[in-house]
Image (spheres, rainbow, N blue to C red):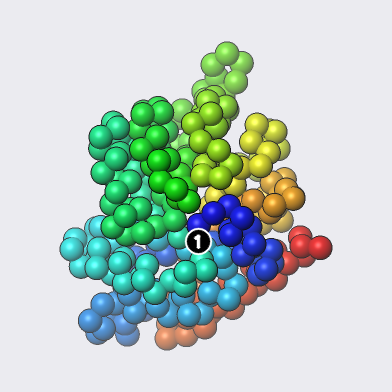
């Protein structure tokens, strides 16, 4: 998907919502466990309930690969079911030496046909560049995450700047605003204005709204630009809004509430 296609979807729907499909087999409603494929049955219902309110879906690969071969089948079926109008993110956090990253890129961009993949930048440019060779595909680079351990490395000072700023400044040379996004946690709001100064036009994937306590309003106020180039991800607060038989209905209502809150930012 091109940048313009994604921006057009955002403006058309007045939504920058991404639904995270962290489909934990231990949490999906019990009545689905009699299905031949409980994960896909759950995802299908979630997609049907939320697709009118969001512009992207982000399967967290760990919840699929942890199930072995059947999990990969569920993932493929889920991808096939997601409307082609929606941006897809493989939340895989890959990144290795060049020839290995090349195989990861082939797996997720050719075999699974994702629009994008999350990538860890720790090993540098040669671990990231294989993903950037694909036309109309995106790398979503980890920059400043919302987990507690982010403080272990991401804020370490070097040359008067924290490490995450060095990552932003260096990595933006590797790609462009057309194929490179960044993960910035919603709970890191005090750093968002500085991040926007470094990368004013790049897309940001912002997890942490909802279950992790991030504020949609505060994040949007500090990151939105003329292209509305942000994706606010919510996973558990939407897909597990209910763990009963009304799970899909409640997920749809939660996604709709997020979209209505986002709508006020569109003129």
Image height of 3 relative to 238, above or below: above
Residue 77: image quadrant is bottom left
Residue 251, given in percent of the width and then of the height, sits at 52, 75
Residue drawn where x is 52% and y is 68% of the image: 85
Mark 1 element type: strand
Residue ID for mark 1: 87
Q: Is residue 222 left or right of residue 57?
A: right
Residue drawn where x is 52% and y is 83% of the image: 249
Residue drawn where x is 43% and y is 40% of the image: 132
The residue nearer to you, when weighing 160 against 187, is: 160
Q: Work out whether residue 20 can be spotted.
A: no
The residue nearer to you, when weighing 87 against 3, is: 3
Residue 189: image quadrant is top right
* Image mark count: 1
Quadrant including the C terminus: bottom right
The residue nearer to you, when weighing 150 against 75, is: 75
Residue drawn where x is 23% and y is 81% of the image: 36
Image height of 217 relative to 244, above or below: above
Residue 266, given in percent of the width and then of the height, sits at 76, 62
Q: In the image as oriented, which residue stretches furthest toward the top?
A: 159
Residue 89, given in percent of the width and then of the height, sits at 44, 56
**Neighbourhood count class around disc 1 (C-alpha, 10 Å): few under 14, some 14–19, many 20 upward:** many
Q: Is residue 76 left or right of residue 200?
A: left
Image height of 260 relative to 88, above or below: below
């Amino acid at each position: 998907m091109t940048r313009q296609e994604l921006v057009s979807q955002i403006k058309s729907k007045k939504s920058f919502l991404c639904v995270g499909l962290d489909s934990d087999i231990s949490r999906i409603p019990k009545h689905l466990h009699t299905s031949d494929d409980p994960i896909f049955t759950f995802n299908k219902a979630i997609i049907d309930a939320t697709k009118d309110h969001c512009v992207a879906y982000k399967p967290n690969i760990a919840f699929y690969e942890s199930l072995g071969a059947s999990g990969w089948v569920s993932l493929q079926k889920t991808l096939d079911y997601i409307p082609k109008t929606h941006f897809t993110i493989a939340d895989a956090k890959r990144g290795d030496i060049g020839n290995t990253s090349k195989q990861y890129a082939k797996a997720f961009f050719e075999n699974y046909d994702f629009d994008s993949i999350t990538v860890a930048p720790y090993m540098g440019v040669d671990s990231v560049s294989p993903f950037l060779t694909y036309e109309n595909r995106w790398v979503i680079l980890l920059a400043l995450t919302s987990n507690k351990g982010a403080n272990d490395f991401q804020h370490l000072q070097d040359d008067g700047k924290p490490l995450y700023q060095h990552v932003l400044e260096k990595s933006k040379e590797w790609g462009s605003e057309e194929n490179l996004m960044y993960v910035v946690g919603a709970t890191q709001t005090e750093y968002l204005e500085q991040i926007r100064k470094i990368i004013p036009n790049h897309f940001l994937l912002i997890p942490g709204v909802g279950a992790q306590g991030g504020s949609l309003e505060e994040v949007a106020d500090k990151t939105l630009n003329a292209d509305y180039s942000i994706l606010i991800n919510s996973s558990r607060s939407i897909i597990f809004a209910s763990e009963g038989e009304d799970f899909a209905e409640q997920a749809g209502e939660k996604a709709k509430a997020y979209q209505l809150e986002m709508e006020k930012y569109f003129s």
